[in-house]
Amino acid sequence: MTIVLDGKKLSLESEKDFSSRVKKIHLNTNSIPILATILVGNDPASNTYVKMKGNACKRIGMDSLKIELEEKTTTDELREKIIELNNNDDVHGILLQHPVPDHIDERSCFDAIDIRKDVDGVTSLGFGRMSMQERAFGSCTPFGIMRLLKEYKIDIEGKSAVVVGRSPILGKPMAMMLLNENATVTICHSKTQKLSEKVSEADIIVGAVGIPKFIKGEWIKDGAVVIDAGYHPEKCGDIDLENIIPRCSAYTPVPGGVGPMTINTLIMQTLQSCENYLELD
Ligand code: NAP
């Protein structure tokens, strides 16, 4: 029987635990975990994502500090704002919503985030530490996927995993996380040749391409675990799911699979950061 990797269910269940941890922090220290969200410019999708993250904070009793900066903000101005938040003891996590306008050096702004507050797992240092299996917050989408795989006891060790996409916030950290769990990992990208052949060898396939239904059901072998990180306005992901669901062993639905886990992981890591700061963990 095909297992549905239900991110919505897991995220709702874990919110109960998060709420009680927030209550405990408040009771013991009178503090409340705070996530600072930075939105630069007026991209409607980014605006929606930031709102969803603020709402998730509210649901579990955390606060969010919403910072909205004009489209014309420079790299230096954005870095200064991040440094101000690094130095603000009331803020436990910093989210810089991706993507920022083209004229901004996004990497240098991500890397200005204090590693202790990098709850979205976007800094180069955090990526390096995670890759070396040192303590660091994981990039939220791939780490959310790892949490789902763990929850449903999906075997990773020794499996052949193919990640299609190599972005710094998704494909690359996903590949490192799977490698750290002893999968044999292939990373594919826009210059990969014979992509369908590579995908057909995967026991675990992760679609992180950004093109609706780009990965075809017929490329995927029977019994594979299918993870679709994509989300498009047509309410579909990067994988042609309809044509694989009956034949795969497990899959993430779109919506309701990877998306809720991303936000849930951001909230979890902000809470963890607050507990680290207060030395409660
Ligand atoms: P991205 O930065 O645009 O990266 C896309 C990747 O796909 C790149 O590595 C690119 O290769 C590769 N690619 C593009 N065309 C390809 C082709 N024809 N064949 C093989 N590979 C190809 O996107 P992203 O930020 O990683 O996001 C990927 C998807 O995940 C999107 O659908 C996005 O909406 C979704 N996403 C979801 C969440 C969530 O919370 N659920 C969060 C983040 C992203 P090159 O490197 O060679 O250009």
Image (cartoon, helix red, strand yellow):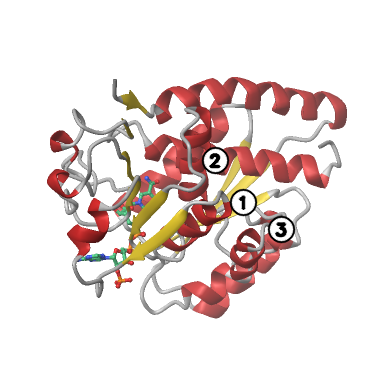
Picture coordinates of residue 157, whole percent (x, y)? 52, 45
Q: Quadrant of residue 208?
A: bottom left
Picture coordinates of residue 70, whole percent (x, y)? 43, 66
Which secondary structure lies at badge 1? Answer: loop
Residues marked 1 and 3 touching at CB (< 8 Å): no
Cα separation, mark 2 vs mark 1, equals: 9 Å
Taking the image as four quarters, which one is ligand 1 found in? bottom left
Query: Going by the image, does 253 lie left or right of 145?
Result: left
Picture coordinates of residue 198, whole percent (x, y)? 26, 60
Q: Amino acid at mark 3?
A: Glu
Residue picked out by circle 2: 265
Mark 1 or 3: in front is: 3
Q: Earlier in the sequence, mark 3 or mark 2?
A: 3
| Residue at 52% across, 59% down | 176
Which secondary structure lies at badge 2? Answer: helix
Q: Amino acid at mark 2?
A: Thr
Is the shortest distance between ligand 1 and the CB of mark 2 under 8 Å? Answer: no
- 52 above or below 179? above
Query: Going by the image, does 276 lie left or right of 33?
Result: right
Considering the image in quadrants, where does the C terminus appear?
A: top right
For residue 68, say whether it is visible. Answer: no
Residues marked 3 and 2 touching at CB (< 8 Å): no
Q: Earlier in the sequence, mark 1 or mark 3?
A: 1
Is the shortest distance between ligand 1 and the CB of mark 1 under 8 Å? Answer: no
Residues marked 2 and 1 touching at CB (< 8 Å): no
Q: Residues within 10 Å of mark 2 (few under 14, many from 20)?
A: many
Q: Earlier in the sequence, mark 2 or mark 1?
A: 1
